[in-house]
Image (spheres, rainbow, N blue to C red):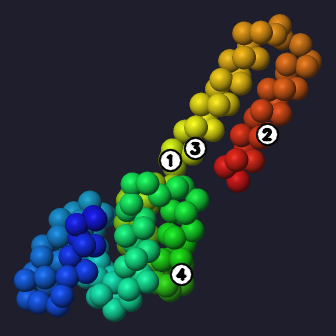
């Protein structure tokens, strides 16, 4: 995916257009209805060539060091540029599926650190205290804080 986006930064030429098309054919095979997906991704590719902010957003999404929050907000900005999120907007839905498959909105370095710290906390509660009202309250508070992290 990153290579496909890098090709968009090259100067306009026949060779660049051929390479974009060949990479689109490969990418579209990983989406439902590959023929339609290729058609919409071709349209998206034209939009990437015209709109440098859209291209910069896509490059940010595929960066391996992007945080979950930054990825989610960048994905949202990209989708806003594509039109209304209605079921009949197949172009929007195709690009959304592509973004869902390439973005790292589930787990990043920060989320893993928080997850491990909660596991260590929970382990400390389970190992050091008998099950009492206090430890149950602590665990429920722990769960509430965990839930707040993801909201």
Q: Which x, y percent locates residue 129?
A: 82, 10
Quadrant hosting residue 36 = bottom left
For marks 3 and 1, give the CA distance.
5 Å
Q: Nearer the viewer, mark 1 or mark 4?
A: 1
Could you say whether the residue bearing mark 4 is in a helix, strand or loop?
helix
Could you say whether the residue bearing mark 3 is in a helix, strand or loop?
helix
Quadrant hosting residue 143 = top right
In the image, taking residue 86 as reference, residue 96 lies left or right, namely left
The answer to which of marks 4 and 3 sits earlier in the sequence is: 4
Q: Which x, y percent locates residue 147?
A: 73, 44
For marks 2 and 4, give the CA distance.
32 Å
The image shows residue 90, relative to residue 30, as above or below, that is below
* Image quarter of the N terminus: bottom left
Q: Determine the residue positioned at 76% across, 17% down.
A: 125
Mark sitting on residue 20: none
Residue where numbered disc 2 is placed: 144
Q: Determine the residue positioned at 37% across, 66% down.
A: 98
Marks 3 and 1 in Cβ contact (< 8 Å) = yes
For marks 2 and 1, give the CA distance.
21 Å
Q: Determine the residue positioned at 58% across, 37% down.
A: 113
The answer to which of marks 2 and 3 sits earlier in the sequence is: 3
For marks 2 and 3, give the CA distance.
16 Å
Residue where numbered disc 4 is placed: 80
Quadrant hosting residue 117 = top right
Q: Which x, y percent locates residue 90?
A: 40, 79
């Amino acid at each position: 995916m990153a290579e496909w986006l890098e090709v968009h930064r090259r100067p306009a030429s026949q060779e660049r257009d051929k390479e974009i098309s060949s990479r689109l054919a490969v990418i579209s095979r990983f989406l439902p209805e590959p023929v339609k997906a290729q058609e919409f991704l071709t349209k998206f590719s034209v939009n990437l060539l015209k709109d440098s902010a859209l291209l910069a957003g896509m490059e940010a999404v595929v960066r391996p060091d992007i945080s979950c929050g930054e990825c989610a907000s960048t994905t949202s900005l990209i989708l806003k540029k594509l039109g209304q999120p209605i079921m009949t907007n197949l172009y929007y839905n195709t690009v959304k599926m592509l973004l869902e498959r390439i973005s790292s909105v589930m787990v990043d370095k920060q989320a893993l650190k928080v997850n491990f710290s909660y596991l260590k906390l929970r382990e400390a509660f389970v190992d050091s205290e008998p099950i009492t009202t206090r430890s149950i309250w602590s665990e429920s508070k722990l769960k509430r804080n965990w839930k707040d992290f993801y909201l």
